[in-house]
Amino acid sequence: MRTVIGLSVFMMVLISVSYCVSEPEIKGGNMPEIKKLTVTSTAFKEGETIPRQYTCDGDDISPALSWQGVPKEAKELALICDDPDAPGGVWTHWTIYGISPDITGLDSNIVKKDSIKIGNQGRTSFGKVGYGGPCPPPGKPHRYYFRLYALDKQLGLKPGISRIEFEQAMKGHIIAQGELMGRYGR
């Protein structure tokens, strides 16, 4: 019994020491701090209900978005809209990337095509390219996050890629980010 207790204590100490030694690596060590972007919309304010016209129950068009605080060193902007409350896990409603850092917002009703004037759009969880508005099942309202990222390099991603490919390409290149959250329920 003493051997089992002694071994357990030894393992806990060993795990604690190894965690303390590796913690800076997990946090990124010398990675620069990620700056904050401000993301807003004329359609809804932070935490408010997304109007019906921007959902599958309405016209299913993208809302106008604007942002501030893009660092001078940014080479590209990228946006993801998702629903973390979806029954099957996070549901991707929109990815758009290759946006020039000089652009300060997106108009409403962005065309649902792979490649558009301001950048490229990826595939959503609906299996389509372009914005797919909130469309939750009946019940408690879901949260929809519009997350904007400023990147330190141009990713050169082709149109129509998956969210996984998109996130892998962004890894290690995010220098600023911000988000706007709206709600929608049925």
Image (spheres, rainbow, N blue to C red):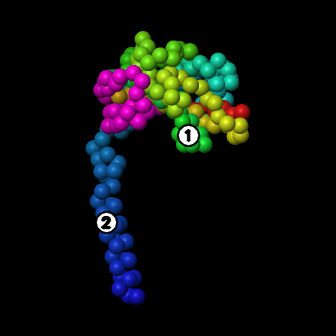
Tell me where residue 163 sits by quadrant.
top left
Q: Is residue 30 above or below residue 154?
A: below
Q: Residue furthest front?
A: 127
Query: Is disc 2 placed on a helix, strand or loop?
Result: helix
How far from the left and from the top, in percent, is residue 22? 30, 57
Q: CA distance from mark 1 to mark 2?
A: 35 Å
Q: Is residue 6 left or right of residue 131?
A: left
How far from the left and from the top, in percent, is residue 37? 45, 29
Crowd class of label 2 (few under 14; some 14 to 19; many from 20; radius 10 Å): few
Front residue of 180 and 94: 94
**In which quadrant will I find the N terminus?**
bottom left
Query: Residue 108 magenta-drawn?
Result: no
Mark 1 residue type:
Pro
Residue highlighted by disc 1: 84
- Is residue 129 visible in the rendered structure shown here? yes
Query: Residue 166 magenta-drawn?
Result: yes
Residue range in magenta is 152-180
Q: Is residue 142 left or right of residue 6?
A: right
Mark 2 residue type:
Val
Residue at coordinates 56% horizontally, 36% vertically from top-left?
Answer: 83
Give the mark, 1 or 2, whose residue is nearer the N terminus: 2
Residue highlighted by disc 2: 17
Dot label at residue 19:
none
Front residue of 71 and 143: 143
Residue at coordinates 50% horizontally, 21% vertically from top-left?
Answer: 130
